[in-house]
Image (cartoon, rainbow, N blue to C red):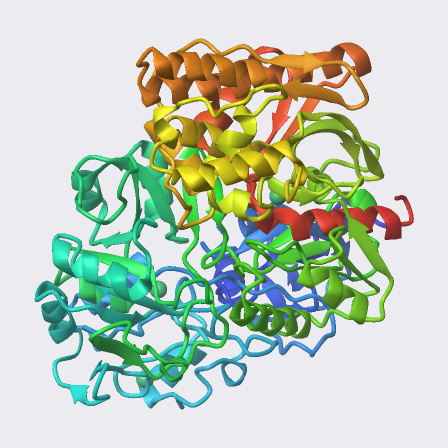
Amino acid sequence: MKSPAGLSSAALRLDVFGVVQGVGFRPFVVRLARRFRLTGWVKNDGRGVQIHVEGGTRGDRERFAGAIETDRPPLARIERVTSRTVPVRGYRDFKVRASGRSGNFVFISPDISVCPACRDEIRDPGNRRFGYPFTNCTDCGPRYTIVRDLPYDRPQTTMADFPLCPDCRREYHDPLDRRYHAQPIACPVCGPSVALRNARTGKTVPGGIEKAADLVRRGKILAVKGLGGFHLVCDPADAGAVARLRRVKKRAVKPLALMVRDISVARRIARISPPEAAALESDRRPIVLVQKRVELPGVAPGLNEVGIMLPYTPLHVLLLDRIKMIVATSSNPKDAPIIKDESEGFSGLCDYILTHNRPIHMRADDSVVRIIREAPVFLRRARGYVPYPQPVPRGFAGARPILALGAELKNTVSVFKNGYVVTSQFLGDLDEYRNRMYFEETLAHLTGLFRVKPACVVSDLHPDFHTTRIAERMGLPHFRVQHHHAHVLAVLLEHGLEPGTRVLGIVWDGYGYGLNGEAWGGEFLIAGYDGFNRFARFEPKPLPGGDLAAREPWRMALSYLWSPGLKAIPAIPGLRPVDPARRRAVWEMIASETHSPLASSCGRLFDAVSALTGLAPLRNEYEAEAAVRLEAAAAPGRTRPYAFMLHDGNPKTLSFDATIREIISDIKRGVSPAIVSARFHETLASAAVETAEKARRELGIRTIVLGGGVFCNRRLLGRVEDLLTKSGFSVLRPRQYSPNDESISVGQVAFALARLSPSG
Ligand code: ZN
Ligand code: ZN
Ligand code: FE
């Protein structure tokens, strides 16, 4: 019989789930147990960490259990802790127990920027790691990009070829040392080293990082090896160097990111809000798009924002200690994946290469965020965030493993196992051959690393996407998910909404294959995990020239201008740069309905307005360039929407013909593009709210999900969220994933979960 006294002398068994391996968790538990004078053990297991504690008072053990969550190491992410009382075993001390190999889902940390303690060491002349660019500890350093296989032990990483020196070995085996079990641990005696090379001759140049900084100052272009690949680097204050970098990258206008020494340098070139500063200084170190304060010629032409990041490896810290600001753009030939190895060739991309001999196993670009209404929106999710696991709603946790291949542009892949989704880094556009290799390389890596044997594969509905064809060849049960439905499902999943939820998904993007085979992209879907109904959509308009219409914004301007009975092309100043013969040919194309498939795309409406105002380029250099320029031009402050119409029907149709007419009359009256852009954004926000209110009146919808690449637009997302909230809706937007097609594979997982789950 158990008395209260007997209970109080019981032992406690804790199971900790989450990212708790390779992040210094076991030494932390040892120190904690010693603090509370408890005995027992800690060990890694298949899903996290197991702990047995006994001794002390019941209060001690409970405070210990509480501190597991509150005092956890910075890189640990605890999803769940379960505890139960177990019999006392009479342990006399507290130890780390060996862990058995397990086929279960073990999480691994993303790559984390150099921590303050390591940064201090490399700047301290008295420290044995002074000036050493590969310094790291259990709180920081490379992870995902150097892991070849699990369990996460040094021989399974690209550090395998660097045997530890006696000093490093002592640190590695001392449970009280900051580097206890830090797998990438290194020092100048035993670790990797940098080399500076002439890119043309291949000859080594003496001087290392010091010399590299000097070369940048002298106008040279350098390739610098970082965590997930090489950057191309030059001096942003040297307009000639920037122009040359643009020539070699074959990029005339696409914005280049900057890396700056610290937040005070960032504040000199941009206006930085507190949440933006927090994002810049976070240990994930993404590129943050912030408001320009000064114009650096050629860095982000025609835009009011510039992308900035802070140094995230010791090598970057040491370089930026010597030159306070650099252009740091991913080193890749146009449209190809980021270069991870010198052998992939820098043919003519740079003058010098600052490289090192720690191999990169997995490529990863820099992540890019924008802070909108105080919270980050991912424009690209990669280094620092991948491969964080995403728990799925409880009703789905029991499903069998799933592999989702994503869409086609801005692709990612996702795997599901044991209640969690892991999504790959941004992989780029799969229409490019080299990105398909990157896709295959990442797919093999993720399924291998997490031991995923998928019970099914999921792809887009589009019959001609590479991912759809790859899925078909896999010989597994195959689900195909409508593109915009997947956008909604990604948001439902990350917000943990349970099966049975029904929302209005407002999904605005450039293009997705519709149920009827038409091009969709201005969608209002009444949706849940089990399916969707198309409640409303943008009025379909011809895409003259098909895919070309997405590249040449003026084609969409003509498409929106055209109406039956209109004989001549209206004279709009924005269309003057277009060759008159091409203008007439496209006008004819629309009139005769040749090569002009219909699309209800929001992205193409942006193109049309951007071209009418004269802000769009003749041809987009990068995806959504015309839309980005239109957004950048918008005048600040409140403004009135233009007219638009919501027509009843199944689906309902939002027509912006009246909007276009008012825009043309504004332009003819000499109203500035800034005002037209502001009013256009306000029009779309009003249209979203009016349609949502209709869905509430007719169907009782109270929750709105926002998705699709158009919602990377700061002004639009901010305004839509604001107006919907004021109207009383609960609004969910993507937080952990991008609104763009990087989240499609996540939504595809959700779709399959609903079909594989016992409760689904
Ligand atoms: Zn550190
Ligand atoms: Zn060493
Ligand atoms: Fe999309």
User: What residue do we see at 43% from left, 17% from top?
Assistant: 664
Above or below — where is 514 with respect to 622?
above
Side (left or right) of 710 relative to 208? right
User: What residue do we see at 57% from left, 54% from top?
Assistant: 409
Above or below — where is 75 with respect to 712?
below
User: What residue do we see at 28% from left, 59% from top?
Assistant: 328
Of residues 584 and 540, which is closer to you in this image? 584
Of residues 283 and 728, which is closer to you in this image? 728
Side (left or right) of 91 relative to 224? right
Residue 308, image x and y in percent? 29, 48
Instruction: Tell me which corner region of the image, top left, top right, bottom left or bottom right, holds residue 249.
Output: bottom left
Instruction: Tell me which corner region of the image, top left, top right, bottom left or bottom right, holds residue 673.
Output: top left
Residue 455, image x and y in percent? 84, 64
Side (left or right) of 238 relative to 671? left
Of residues 198 and 174, which is closer to you in this image? 198
Work out whether residue 509 can be spotted.
Answer: no
Residue 155, image x and y in percent? 52, 85
Instruction: Tell me which corner region of the image, top left, top right, bottom left or bottom right, holds residue 706.
Output: top right
Work out whether residue 287 can be spotted.
Answer: yes
User: What residue do we see at 78% from left, 37% from top?
Assistant: 498
Tell me the quarter of the image containing the C terminus.
Answer: top right
Side (left or right) of 425 relative to 178? right
Q: Quadrant of ligand 1?
A: bottom left
Question: How many marks on residues?
Answer: 0
Residue lying farthest to the right in this orientation = 758
Residue 291, image x and y in percent? 28, 34
Of residues 498 and 722, which is closer to you in this image? 722
